Image (cartoon, rainbow, N blue to C red):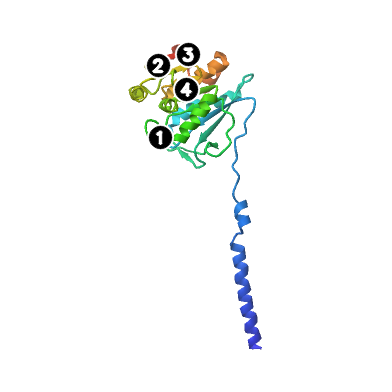
Amino acid sequence: MRFVLLIIICFGMSSCGNTSEEKTTPTPTETNTSKKAKVFPKLDSTRYNVAFLIMDGVYNTELTAPFDIFQHTIFRDSIKAMNVFTVANTNELITTFEGLRLAPDYNYMEDIIPPIDILVVPSAEHHLDTDLEDTEMLKFVKIVGNKAKFVTSHCDGAFVLAKAGLLENVVSTTFPSDIKAMRSMFPSLDIREDVLFVHDGKFITSAGGAKSFEAALYLCEYLYGNKITRSLADGLVIDWDLSKVPHTVISR
């Protein structure tokens, strides 16, 4: 009797151990299904697609100033508004120079990117050095820039456009204190100073900083007219008067 009881106890202990292991060890199927599929922005096909190129070290203002202006177009009637989204070379969070953490909407290294009508290149911490060695990023900028209706840069984003070969025979500008460096790095380019932005063909390059608002508002005025643009500026408490903004428009 004692022998039978001992067998029963041992069997019960063995069974409990197996049951516990089955409950705590996920199967390959369970592990795979726990991963969430990437969710992309819902884009309105009747709008312009506006892509903001972001990377570690991107400066907040050059990103958020035009982003605010362009995103607010969806609240205006009877215009072709803008879908705004971000693109990067990673799925990981991007950390801005000021420490803001952003999740990119698209990874241009692996995702299918929607057609881009307007490419925005904000400034980033290393746009004068190591970013200019990123061949995949420069290739992306060049391909998109050649196809886009408009390409805009803010502050040192102009260095990226220049390195990608997009500013040949194009008048441009950049952050005031970096004009000398840009002229030295790209001696064949026509780089203007004492202006907040330059519009030449489909390229709009700006001095950046808080004046990124002005360059973005200018593109809106070019596309939508003064009335709509004034309403966008008023909504963000910006005193908008193009005649008071130092700028250059190249007529060809």
Under mark 4, the amino acid is Phe
Residue 133, labelled with which disc? 1
Under mark 3, the amino acid is Leu
Residue at figure coordinates x 54%, y 13% from the top left: 226
Under mark 1, the amino acid is Glu
Q: Nearer the viewer, mark 1 or mark 2?
A: 1
Q: In which quarter of the image is the N terminus?
A: bottom right
Residue furthest out toward the bottom: 1
Q: What element carries label 2?
A: loop
CA separation in Å, label 2 and label 4: 14 Å
**Residue 106 visible in the shown view:** yes
Q: Nearer the viewer, mark 3 or mark 1?
A: 1
CA separation in Å, label 3 and label 1: 36 Å
Q: Which quadrant of the view contains residue 38?
A: top right
Residue at figure coordinates x 58%, y 36% from the top left: 112
Above or below, comparing residue 30 to residue 135 in the picture:
below
* Sequence order check, earlier mark of 1 and 2: 1
| Residue hosting label 3 | 242
CA separation in Å, label 4 and label 1: 29 Å
